[in-house]
Amino acid sequence: QVLLVESGGGLVQAGGSLRLSCAASGRPFDPYAVGWFRQAPGKEREFLGGISWNGTNTYYTNSAKGRFTISRDNAENMDTVYLQIDSLKPEDTAVYHCAAGKDFWDRNNYITFGPGTQVTVSS
């Protein structure tokens, strides 16, 4: 089973950028896709997009297109997925989670989530 840990969150001013990381460890039986989600206080968890197991294909929701970029570094001994967020807005304030699943475009198939990293955007 794969284990995921996010990092890179913090406090940033509106208009700035952040790159979040998702470090994967463990020995999954099958190749896995990684998706990014976020959850703001009092709101439902929102799917932002996902990347295929080999990093060659990505999917973004309509709300994530343009400012969010997902990439993946499949090194031999480590697997890290990144979420670049540009032109940050106060409404991007949320806990950001990465998750492992089978189909990178399907928000309903992600079953293993990391604990999350807090992103706070000040106006």
Image (cartoon, rainbow, N blue to C red):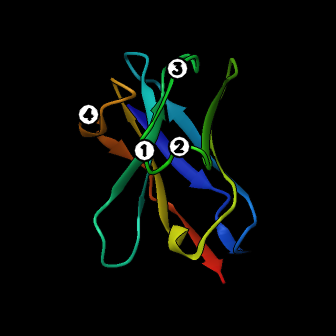
Q: Are marks 2 and 4 in contact (CB under 8 Å)?
A: no
Query: What residue is shown with label 2?
Result: 65
Question: Gap between marks 2 and 3, in whole Å?
Answer: 14 Å
> Which label lies toward us, 4 or 1?
1
Q: How many marks?
A: 4
| Residue appearing at x 67%, y 71% in the figure | 10
- From the viewer's perspective, is 74 left or right of 60? right
Q: Are marks 1 and 3 in contact (CB under 8 Å)?
A: no
The numbered mark, 4 or 1, whose residue comes first in the sequence reads: 1
The three-letter code of the residue at mark 4 reads Asn
Query: What residue is shown with label 3?
Result: 57
Q: Are marks 2 and 1 in contact (CB under 8 Å)?
A: yes
Q: State the image coordinates of residue 61 (x, y, percent, origin top left).
A: 41, 42
The three-letter code of the residue at mark 1 reads Asn
Numbered label attached to residue 109: 4
Q: State the image coordinates of residue 8 (x, y, percent, origin top left).
A: 68, 58
- From the viewer's perspective, is 71 left or right of 29? right
